[in-house]
Amino acid sequence: MRTKKTGVSRREFLRQTAAVGLGALATGGLPRLGRGASKDRLTILQSVAADSLNPYAHSASPTYGIWQHFFDPLVEVDYEKKEFYGVLAESWEFQGQKWVFRLKKGVRFHDGSPFTAKDVIYSITRMREDKRSLQRENFREVTEMRAPDDHTVIITTQKPMAVLLDRLHNRFMISKAAADKYGEQADAHAIGTGPYKFVSFVRDGNMVMTRNDDYWGPKPDIKEVIYKKVGEEAARVAGLLAGQGDVINNVSVEEAARLSQHPRARIEKVAGLRMYFLAMNAAMKPFDNKLVRQAISYSVDPQAIIKYIYDGNGYLMDGPVASNVIGANPKLKRYPFEPKRAKDLLAKAGYPGGLEVKLYFSPDRYPKAKEICQVIADQLSQSGIKTELVSQQFVIFWGKEGVNGGKLPFYYVGRPAVDADTVYDQYFRSGVTKRVNYRNPEFDRLIDEEQRTGDQKKRAALLQEAGRILMEDAALVPLYNLAEIYGVARNIVWKARPDEKILAADMKIRT
């Protein structure tokens, strides 16, 4: 589907669709910032920061990027090849209800102690048992872990779990010896096996680190790194242009053109992993009716949102997951924008006079959510669907009275994924969560099968078929994944990643 050329400017488009009356957020003042890059120092101005030194009390990609300087995971993702590769794990073998991991030898923690299988078991156990952990659900199927020797870990699960590699992604290994030595204060030392060593930390402020010259892997070029939380975009941009920072995240499309023309800065852009869609709760009327869901799918034109709100910095989704996700089905095509066809479907569903619905969104979590939902409401009106927009703070939107309690019938949401299973299992598999209450026995069967299939090509094919069923059932309205846009000082050599991580070990400073 392609949007018709109308000659309407982006400014005029936004003015017209702002009739719902939602305003823009005001920006705050510029905080005091430190110096930017020298030959050996890099300063990253990021919109979010770690609010504690517990590496498991987080579940956001930008925060994972901070921790990955200190700690290594067992596996990482090659986003171009759409496959996992080993970091601390040398190799692995899927044996039905068991996974056998062979660990790299010669790896040492920052304090010189060796990395062994005991550290892996300790780390996963803490992820599962720490009351503050936001990562325990990744290991809900694990029943036993054992170490037959220092460099082998065997993980047993309740049933075959071919998706364990994805569950181990962004799960960092910490030191059991440090925990034994320092007890509850172990986190304050942040002793890992990573390319940088911890220096200091201020909650919601600076995180300072220095290069680990004894790193087991490739030695980073940059010696000192400072992560600085700067919540307001205007302040991040000002800091970059003033030479007080070297990399900034969450650059808006409005600022991107200005930065790209500045003598100090350039833009780094990559297709992100966060996918945006409209969720419909199939346990609530009228969304329990497939014809209604299909009508809504024919009533939304995300290409217009990409063009006019994001200035083309987005990528249309033709299926339930973006094209850069493992298990995406390249043969799927989204529902075209056909309001007349939508009206016919509504009439067949018993709504010849149209519908009235509420569309929920969280403006403090998803960029430009207000503007986007204004546009969607305007598009739905062309099919006879009158839409009331309901804005909620994220803590309410996402809580037990909202998405996770299954209380919202219709909402706009974003979800990152490396593997389609994480979205399909969490949102659409029967009984896992209440987020959409979708039920389809054939879909469940496919998810069951792919989760126990060790052959990754066969598993991807099963995920592709599962995606086809979701589109046929109109279980969601896929929209787009957006470009992750960064501002970067021109003397910084760096290629942005799709997972929102800013890793200093990937950078060099031109002198």
Image (cartoon, rainbow, N blue to C red):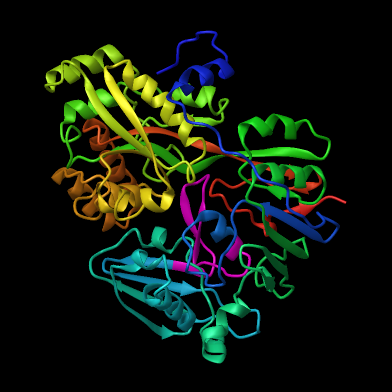
Is residue 167 shown above or below 26? below
- Quadrant for the N terminus in the image: top left
Tell me how many marks there are: 0
Residue at the extreme right: 511
Residue 497 visible: yes
Q: Is residue 335 left or right of residue 256?
A: left
In this view of the protein, which residue sits in the foreground, 22 or 121? 22
Residue nearer the viewer, 224 or 134: 134
- Say which quarter of the image contains residue 452: bottom left
Q: Residue at x 76, y 50 (%)?
A: 246
The correct choice, above or below, for 337 with respect to 316 in the image is above
Q: Residue furthest bottom?
A: 181
Position in image of residue 47 (x %, y %) = 61, 51
Q: Which residues are magenta?
A: 66-91
Q: Is residue 73 above or below residue 290?
A: below
Let me know if residue 417 is in the magenta part.
Answer: no
Residue 86's spot in the image, x, y percent? 51, 63
- From the viewer's perspective, is 342 left or right of 131? left
Q: Closest to the observer: 376 or 451?
A: 376
Residue 251 image offset from top left, x and y in percent = 63, 40
Q: Say if residue 489 shows up in the picture.
A: no
> Residue at coordinates 46% horizontally, 26% vertically from top-left?
21
Residue 322 image-quadrant placement: top left
Q: Position of residue 22 (x, y in %)?
A: 47, 30
Is 409 situated above or below 404? above
Q: Is residue 183 left or right of residue 161?
A: right
Residue 508 appears left or right of 73: right
